[in-house]
Amino acid sequence: MLFGLFGRKKKNADKRPKPTSRSSESASKPSRPFGQLLDEPADEATSELSQEMYRSLTEFNLFVASYIDEQQAARAQQLCEKLPDPNPVQAKLAGGLDTPQELVATLAADPGLTAEVLRTVNSAAFSLTSPISSVQHAVNYLGVSFVKGLVSQAATADQTKGCSEAQRTALQRAWLSTAVASAFANLLGQNAGHPRPSVLATKALFFNLGDLGFILGEESAHTWYAEGMTVLDRIKAQQQGSGLNAAIVGSTLARSWGLPEDIERAIANSMLPLVKTPAQLPRVLQEDELKDTVLLYLAARIGDRVAYRGLRDLSEFNLEAEDEPGIFFLKNHLDTSDQKLVIKLLSDTGFRNKFNRLLSTLAI
C-alpha cells in the first residue's frame, strides 16, 4: 500500500499553546486579502495573463494558523481527533533517521514494519528488474529519503482498510506528492550546498498531514485531490468547504502529536509563497526560515506536478510559466532569497537526470 494513516491513540495532549493564543512570527500578519497589505507595483506582471494571475493570487485571502478564530481552531482540532495518533516510528522519523544505518536498525526492531515496507517496494508501483529482499537493499536502491517516506506510510497502513476507494485514491496522490517532494528536497539540498539536506527532506515528508486530516475527516474532501488539481484550486476548495486549509490542519496535527516545533512551523508557513509577493514574503517570515520555506515550497510543487499532473521529466517543469498559479512567484522568491543556484540547477541537465532517474524507479 502506497499510503497510510496513523496508529495508536495518544494519552496525553501536547501542552504547547493553541494557534489562537500563539502569535507566530512566521505567519502572515492580517487575515485579509494579501493584495491590500502593500501598495506595490505589479513588477511581476508584464502581460495581460500575468496581470490577471497576479491579481488572483494577491487578492486571495489565504487563512493562516496564527490568525484563525476560536471556531476555526476548534474545527481544526476536531479533524485532528478523527485520526489515530502516530506509530512511535513517526517521532523517530521526525527527529532524524538520516543515515542508512539508523534507518535499517529501526526497522530491524519491527519485523512487521519491515515486511510492509518490502511488500510496498516489491509491488507493482515500482519498476524493479529483480526483487528487493532487505531494507538495506531498498535504501541502496531508492535512497534514505524515499525509504523514510515508505516507512512513514507503512507504519500505519492498516488504518486505511476502512477507507473508500475514492479516499484511497486521494490518499495515494497526497502520499506520492509528499514522498517525491521529500526525495527532491534531499537531492536539491545536496546539490545546492544546503547545510542539512536531510532536515529539508524530513520537513517535506510531513507536509501531507493536513491533507490526511481532510481526506479522512471531511466526507467529500477526496474531490479536492482529483487529477489535474492545482494547489490554488485545492486550497480554495478546502477554505470554502471547511473554513480551513491543509497548512492549518497539518500544523495543528503536528502540534497535537508532539512533533518538533520546526516541523510545525514549516507546515504552517508552507502556503505563504503561493500568495505573497517576493517583496512581502521576507516581511512575514523570520530571516532564518525564508530560504527553507521557499525550497520546501518548490519541492512541494514538484511533488504535486508528479502526483496530480503526471510530470516525468524535470525539463518539463517551467519555472516561468505565467499560467501556473502555484509557481507564479517562485522564481522571484528564489532570486530574492539569494538562491540563484537553485534556479540554475533546475535547468542543469545533470541535476535533471538525477531527479529523472529517481522518478524512473516508480512505475507511475
Image: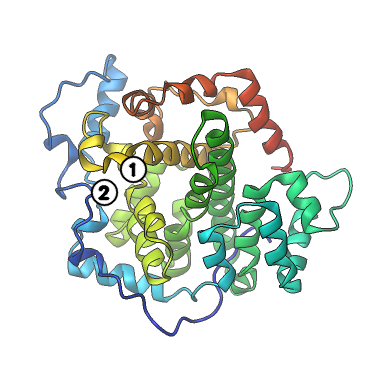
Frontmost residue, 289 versus 196: 196
The spot of residue 195 in percent (x, y) is 49, 38
Residue 97 in which image quadrant: bottom right
Residue 171 in which image quadrant: bottom right
**Secondary structure type for disc 1:** helix
Q: Residue at x 47, y 73 (%)?
A: 83
Left or right side of 165 for 47 = left
The spot of residue 304 in percent (x, y) is 51, 41
Type of amino acid at the residue the image marks with label 2: Ser
The spot of residue 162 in percent (x, y) is 59, 74
Left or right side of 364 for 283 = left
Type of amino acid at the residue the image marks with label 1: Glu
The spot of residue 283 in percent (x, y) is 20, 37
Q: Residue at x 20, y 21 (%)?
A: 42
Residue 357 in which image quadrant: top right
Query: On the image, numbered disc 1 is attached to which residue?
Result: 289
Marks 2/1: CA distance? 8 Å
Q: Are marks 2 and 1 in contact (CB under 8 Å)?
A: yes
Number of other residues with Cα within 10 Å of mark 2, as a class: few under 14, some 14 to 19, many 20 or more: many
Question: Which numbered dot is residue 26?
Answer: 2
**Secondary structure type for disc 2:** loop
Q: Quadrant of the C terminus?
A: top right
Left or right side of 234 for 194 = right
Q: Quadrant of the N terminus?
A: bottom right
Q: Is residue 123 visible?
A: no
